[in-house]
């Protein structure tokens, strides 16, 4: 077991969260996104989300973050969860949905799932204003 994997596991990250972190799931950007938003949370972590949207459905999602493993695992989980979902379905998500999807994250990192969800909601809000 790698040292990073061991540290994340010992800290309370689930196996799924560790896999997302190690594989950089959906980390990156999209060319010509239909929606894009950058948000900085109260802890100082920053997330930027990029969305492709067609007929009210998110067809692709990527993110970039400046922050801890919690921000990266939350961004990965969220982008996986929202792909091929309607905007209305995505607007109903909250941090508990992200935490449930991950299956475990240290208590002190729960705010990272909130950062991911808030960034998504701001991106959708901005997209709707443009339509």
Image (tube, helix red, strand yellow):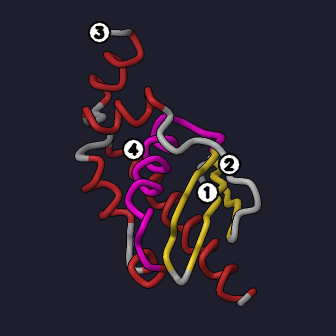
The CA span between labels 4 and 3 is 24 Å
Residue named by callout 4: 108
Residue named by callout 2: 29
Total marks shown come to: 4
The CA span between labels 1 and 3 is 32 Å
The CA span between labels 2 and 3 is 30 Å
In the depicted structure, whether residue 71 falls above or below residue 38: above
In the depicted structure, whether residue 53 falls above or below residue 100: below
Callout 1: SS: loop
Secondary structure mostly taken by the magenta-highlighted segment of the chain = helix
Residues under numbered marks 2 and 4 in contact, where contact means CB atoms less than 8 Å apart: no
The CA span between labels 2 and 4 is 27 Å
Q: What segment carries the magenta color?
A: 65-86
Callout 2: SS: loop
Task: Answer with mark 4 or mark 3, whichever residue precedes in sequence.
Answer: 3
From the top left corner, tell me how far across and down residue 68 is, in percent. Answer: 54, 36
Mark 4 neighbour density, 10 Å: few (under 14) some (14–19) many (20 or more) = few
From the top left corner, tell me how far across and down residue 113 is, in percent. Answer: 43, 55
Image quadrant in which the N terminus is located: top left
Indicate the quadrant where residue 97 lies: bottom left
Image quadrant in which the C terminus is located: bottom right
Residue at left 44%, top 79%?
Answer: 86
């Amino acid at each position: 077991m790698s040292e990073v994997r061991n540290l994340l596991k010992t800290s309370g990250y689930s196996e799924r969260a560790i896999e997302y972190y190690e594989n950089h799931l959906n980390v990156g950007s999209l060319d010509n996104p239909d929606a894009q938003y950058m948000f900085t949370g109260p802890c100082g972590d920053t997330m930027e989300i990029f969305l492709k949207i067609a007929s009210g459905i998110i067809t692709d999602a990527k993110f970039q973050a400046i922050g801890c493993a919690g921000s990266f695992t939350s961004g990965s989980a969220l982008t996986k969860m929202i792909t091929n979902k309607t905007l209305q379905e995505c607007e109903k998500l909250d941090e508990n949905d992200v935490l449930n999807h991950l299956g475990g994250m240290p208590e002190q990192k729960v705010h990272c799932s909130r950062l991911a969800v808030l960034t998504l909601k701001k991106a959708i809000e901005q997209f709707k204003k443009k339509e």
